[in-house]
Image (tube, rainbow, N blue to C red):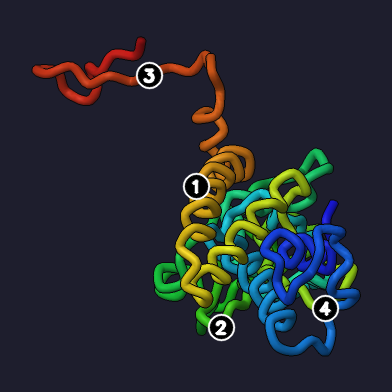
Amino acid sequence: MATYLKLVQELVAELGIGGANTGGTVPDTVLSQTGQLWNAVNWIKQAENNINLMWADWRFLATDYEETLTVSSTAVPAHSGIETVNKWDRTSFWIDLTQTSSGQLEWMEWSKFRALLLPGSGGAGNGKPSTITQKRNGDLLLNTPCDTAYTLTAEFWKEPVLLSANTDLPAMPAQFHRIIICEAAIKYGNKEAAGEVIQGMEAEYIYLLDKLEGDQLEGREYERLSTQDIPIVVGIPGYTDDDSRTR
């Protein structure tokens, strides 16, 4: 598993930046670098972040939410962990998931929720919530004030965190760390007008991105199988959608 520093060292060694040898020991820190070594540090940081931002729902950015709801309140507590929520999995909200009385919350868009379910002058008595929404400021809101301190669980995709310290690890699985070096090398090639570097690294980057997406995007894993047993739905001319055949 390659740390931030190790990725920078590999990039510097492979490209011979600043006359570095292939031992992979230059630089000895990502901090306070100047010149081309500063560029190398920055290129690795930018490359990892660019890949993280390519898809909001990378599997390696997914994490769990679990908080206790407040009695007589429709407000949902913010995530208490160190991660920052980027996107919620809207199908993942459950109340008391491990209990026999568990129930899945329906997600409703804020504009519809505000018009139909937002408690108003008529008031809403305490009960077990059934619907959840997200306000424009990012806060989550329930349709009914809680009658019990239910446990709310969910899943979300976190905001990527920029690499900063020597020992920081990329968010993606270790077997794909090479793609970060490829993109960083392309940035080097663009700056130095080194077309041969760009050409070689682009080919490897495209190959690795295809593998990363197949491994870390839901629904894309089937593209990476040589054999698979999944139905193919075929629309037959002259038939309605209901008459489509699966084979």
Is 73 left or right of 141, judged from the image as shown? right
Task: From the image, tell me which residue sits under label 4.
Answer: 30
Task: From the image, tell me which residue sits under label 2.
Answer: 137
> How far across and down, in percent of the image, does residue 107 sit?
53, 57
Task: From the image, tell me which residue sits under label 1.
Answer: 203
Looking at numbered disc 4 in the image, what kind of residue is underneath it?
Answer: Val
Q: What element carries label 1?
A: helix
Circle nearer the viewer, 1 or 3? 1
Q: How crowded is mark 4: few (under 14 residues within 10 Å), some or many (20 or more)?
A: many
Q: Earlier in the sequence, mark 4 or mark 3?
A: 4
Q: Is any part of residue 143 visible from this angle?
A: no
Looking at numbered disc 3 in the image, what kind of residue is underneath it?
Answer: Ile
Q: Residue at x 49, y 60 (%)?
A: 198
Task: From the image, tell me which residue sits under label 3.
Answer: 232
Q: In which quarter of the image is residue 25?
A: bottom right
Q: Earlier in the sequence, mark 2 or mark 3?
A: 2
Q: Earlier in the sequence, mark 2 or mark 1?
A: 2
Q: How crowded is mark 1: few (under 14 residues within 10 Å), some or many (20 or more)?
A: few
Of the pair 69 and 2, the residue shown nearer to us: 2
Q: Residue at x 47, y 72 (%)?
A: 193
What is the C-alpha distance between the residues marked 2 and 1?
A: 42 Å
The quadrant in which the C terminus is found is top left
Circle nearer the viewer, 2 or 4? 4
